[in-house]
Image (cartoon, rainbow, N blue to C red):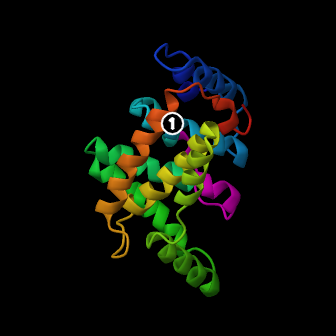
Amino acid sequence: MDDCFRLVAENQNIDPQLREISKNLAGSFDMKDPASLEDAVQLATLLHVLRFDELSTGIVEKVGSADFDGNFDRWTWIELALVLGIRLKRLLGDVSSAENLKVKVLAVLDCGDETQVKLKHKVFNRFMRGSLLSRDKAVKAQEDGYFDSEVLRRLSYFRELAKISELGGSSEYPVERAEREISENIDRLNEIIKKDIKYSGIFDQA
């Protein structure tokens, strides 16, 4: 059983649903499988929201240990793990480790031929301006009263805001704004989590 998932599965302070999901991940996790990576990042994000940062760190360190191999289906989730890792390290005051992870994330922007690099930088700049945020999907799920869906949308929204914040923000979307919205989003997530939600709907392989 993989230690980072085992520690979650054995922690009695964690919701039994999440412990069971972590137990399943411990037996099935595959670094080459995008769905496995997605589930691991979802779990790590939830653990951070719930303030189990040490357990979250163990998972993001495992996922973030992978290097970019040209497979963007996998890298999407590895990058998100790295961004969460940057945040966790920064919050712990480990600035050096946070900076090393940031360099790893940004280096991928310059991989590929000239056309690919230009396109990646263009998309990245749009993202940092806040043009690609999915807040509307979270708000729609909230208005419709679909709590399970809202948790899923808000976890995604959190990761987007964290990426903007941890990679330095932009004039259109400064770090201070991203952090303010992260705080509001986490407050809402914790409010929903107190309800009787089913975490299985958040995980691909639960």
Q: What quarter of the picture does the N terminus occupy? A: top right
Residue 58 appears in the picture as rendered: no
Write the residue at 44% across / 37% down.
49
Give the magenta part as a residue range. Answer: 62-77
The quarter holding residue 70 reads bottom right
Q: Position of residue 81 (x, y in %)?
A: 52, 48
Write the residue at 35% across / 47% down.
183
Q: Position of residue 180 (x, y in %)?
A: 32, 54
- 131 or 35: which is nearer to us? 131
Q: Amino acid at mark 1?
A: Leu
Q: Classify residue 61 as left or right of residue 36.
A: left
Write the residue at 50% across / 70% down.
127
Residue 69 appears in the picture as rendered: yes
Q: Let me know if residue 108 is in the magenta part.
A: no
Q: Position of residue 31 (x, y in %)?
A: 67, 43
Write the residue at 56% across / 84% down.
118
The quarter holding residue 123 reads bottom right
Q: Let me know if residue 73 is in the magenta part.
A: yes
Q: State the residue position of label 1.
A: 46
Q: Position of residue 168 (x, y in %)?
A: 34, 66
Is residue 185 placed above or below 44 in the rendered structure?
A: below
Q: What quarter of the picture does the C terminus occupy? A: top right
